[in-house]
Amino acid sequence: MPNISKNYKSLAWLTNGAGGRVLLWALAMLLAALYLHAWCYALVNDDTGIYLATAERVAEGEVLYKSLYAGYTPLGIYSWALLKKLCGQATTYAHYLALNLLWLWLCALLCYLLGLRITASRRAAVAAALLVLALAYAYEGTYIVLEPFVLIFSLATLLLLHNSPARPAQLYGAGLCMGLAFLSKQYGLLMWIPAGYVVMAGFEGTRGRLQALGRLLLGFALPLGVLFGCYASCYHTGPQELLHAWGRYATSYHFGERSWGKMLAALARFVGSSLPLLLLLPLYARQLSGRKHLLFHSLLLTFMAFGSSLFYRQYPHYFLLLIPPAVLMGLYLLKAGWQLARLRPLLLTAVALTLLLAGLRPALGFLDMEQQRKTRLRQQQYALAARINEELPPGSEVLLMTYYHQRLAYLCRFRPVDPIGTGYTFTDILYP
């Protein structure tokens, strides 16, 4: 294999001396500025009306899945409700958004730690973490969504399982993280696929594998048991009612809204977007076989499991779940193909260019007409809400008719009521 670094002598400053550190710090500062700008000027997205209106009613004392309804598992909603409790009447949209952005940066930290398991190069791990943040910025990571909650517990699961065989404490911790990922959003249940593979491939003998699976299951059951126990003792609500609410969102709602043609089109888009990665895998099949590459296999299974969920739902923020495993697999493939020391200049240059391209358009947004349009649109959102509040005061109960009304109801501080109970919004007194 030729020494690639000879062809890139002009880029040696990236790895020698302080040049590489300066570049990575500059990119980190650029991303920090972009996220700060998004925090100050981000639009109120439609999902805000679903999540925050529900969370604020929980903070007021109403009971989720009993006096009001939500089709999502509760961790994100309770997190925002706790924030509302702590900040009181001073809570604004910026407070909730700051919590989501904090979760995203913690995800980047976990990607950095996983990157160190893949390669000893700190700069390569930092570059991978920055790339995750840049791509998350492009895929609605600066909106109020639940995917960052799922991601942080999914990445923690992979981090705990990276040793083979994992110690008992790691298995309990990984199971706990999978349980919390599931309680963040139903997608978290898919983490059983890579976790089960690590157990089956990393442990020898039927007894060892069953013991490991049992520890994972106990850790997974702990947060669910606490939740079910609290609901049963405090609200006299059984597990079947919670599972019914979660199941409606995870199955019937989405199966009912998509035709087979749209599902096949979504599959084609997913395969097309991941085609470069899929074409690279056969080239490294022999190098990546064996137990020592369990982390790569678990990343691949995580990517495929979360990717399969896109067959029915293709909103941009759903792709947030694919970004960390895809970036870390790319780092792994580069390391497996050539010695990282030879490829480091090219790797850092590619990451730098990707970050600059991802950040260039939002960075120019400070000056261009598009950013001015978004600023005016946000002002119009709040102006429209103020005009509506002249006729209907905050706290009024309204019937939701369209998806857009979720956002408008939140801005006007209304109390939405959906008597149909589709599983995607919430309704008063679902269980008398």
Image (cartoon, helix red, strand yellow):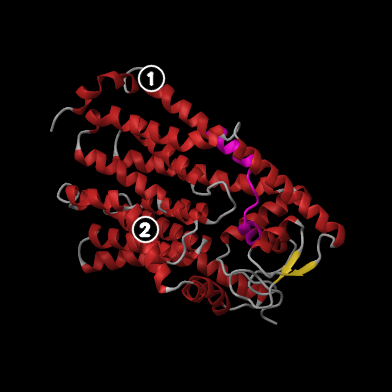
Q: Secondary structure at mark 2?
A: helix
Expressed as whole percent of the image width and height from the top left, the position of residue 373 reads: 65, 42
Question: Residue flagged by tag 1: what amino acid is it?
Answer: Gly
Q: Earlier in the sequence, mark 2 or mark 1?
A: 1
User: Viewer-proximal residue, 408 or 153?
Assistant: 408
**Overall secondary structure of the magenta section:** helix
Q: Is residue 421 left or right of residue 265?
A: right
Query: For mark 2, does the 10 Å Cα neighbourhood hold few (<14), some (14 to 19), or many (20 or more) residues?
Result: some
Residue, disc 2? 270
Q: Which mark is residue 40?
A: none
Could you say where residue 198 lies in the image, as x and y percent from the top left?
Answer: 29, 58
Q: CA distance from mark 2 to mark 1?
A: 37 Å
The answer to whether residue 353 is visible is yes
Answer above or below: position of 28 versus 199: above
Magenta part of the chain:
32-51
Residue 34 part of the magenta segment: yes
Using the rendered view, name the quadrant where residue 11 is placed. Answer: top left
| Callout 2 amino acid | Phe
Taking the view exactly as shown, the residue that stands out farthest to the left is 1
Q: Residue at x 18, y 47 (%)?
A: 284
Q: Residues within 10 Å of mark 1 (few under 14, many from 20)?
A: some
